[in-house]
């Protein structure tokens, strides 16, 4: 009976390790100048997933936040970092952009914490 949770735990650890290995391998084997346009979005998706999983795991083991709160915090944190990276990649990152991004993420956090449609 304990084999199923142990298997699930190893599957989750394997997925996280695979996620962290994929990024450096992708970055070292590709040239951004030679990539087709749809693949240029892939690093941002990878960054979001890596940050999301990391924050979820940290919140799970270091705090007693509920599942809903953990998912909201992780998704907003990852979204903020990815948004700032996108601005930087198109050379549009300024103090004003950071302030606007923080305000939007803050408003989204207030709304999502009070939302009852997220289980």
Image (cartoon, helix red, strand yellow):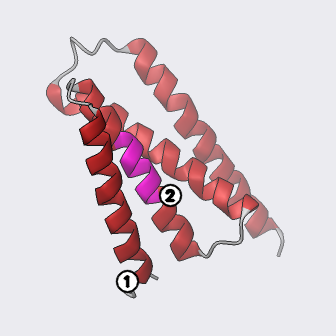
Residue tagged 2? 74
Q: Secondary structure at mark 1?
A: loop
- Please say if 21 is above or below 82: above
Measured as percent of width and height from the top left, residue 102 is found at: 35, 52
Residue 42 appears in the figure: no
- Please say if 101 is above or below 7: above
Q: Earlier in the sequence, mark 1 or mark 2?
A: 2
- Please say if 84 is above or below 107: above
Measured as percent of width and height from the top left, residue 88 is found at: 29, 28
Residue that protrudes farthest toward the right in the picture: 2
Q: Is residue 64 left or right of residue 44?
A: right
Quadrant that contains the N terminus:
bottom right
Residue 17 appears in the figure: yes
Mark 1–mark 2 CB contact (< 8 Å): no
**Which residue corresponds to the image point at 32% horizontal and 41% vertical from the top-left?**
98
Q: Magenta span covers which residues?
A: 75-82
**Which residue corresponds to the image point at 25% horizontal and 40% vertical from the top-left?**
96
Q: Is residue 73 left or right of residue 36?
A: right
Query: Total label count?
Result: 2
Q: Is residue 115 magenta?
A: no
- Please say if 31 is above or below 52: above
**Label 1: how many Cα within 10 Å (few below 14, some 14–19, many 20+):** few
Q: Secondary structure at mark 2?
A: helix
Image mark for residue 8: none
Residue tagged 1? 115
């Amino acid at each position: 009976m304990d084999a199923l949770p142990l298997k699930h735990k190893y599957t989750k650890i394997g997925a996280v390790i695979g996620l962290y290995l994929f990024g450096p391998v992708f970055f070292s084997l590709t040239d951004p100048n030679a990539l087709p346009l749809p693949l240029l979005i892939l690093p941002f998706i990878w960054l979001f997933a890596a940050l999301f999983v990391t924050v979820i795991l940290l919140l799970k083991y270091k705090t007693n936040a509920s599942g809903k709160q953990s998912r909201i915090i992780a998704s907003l944190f990852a979204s903020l970092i990815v948004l700032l990276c996108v601005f930087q990649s198109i050379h549009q990152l300024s103090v004003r952009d950071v302030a606007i991004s923080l305000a939007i993420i803050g408003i989204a956090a207030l709304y999502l914490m009070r939302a009852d449609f997220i289980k």
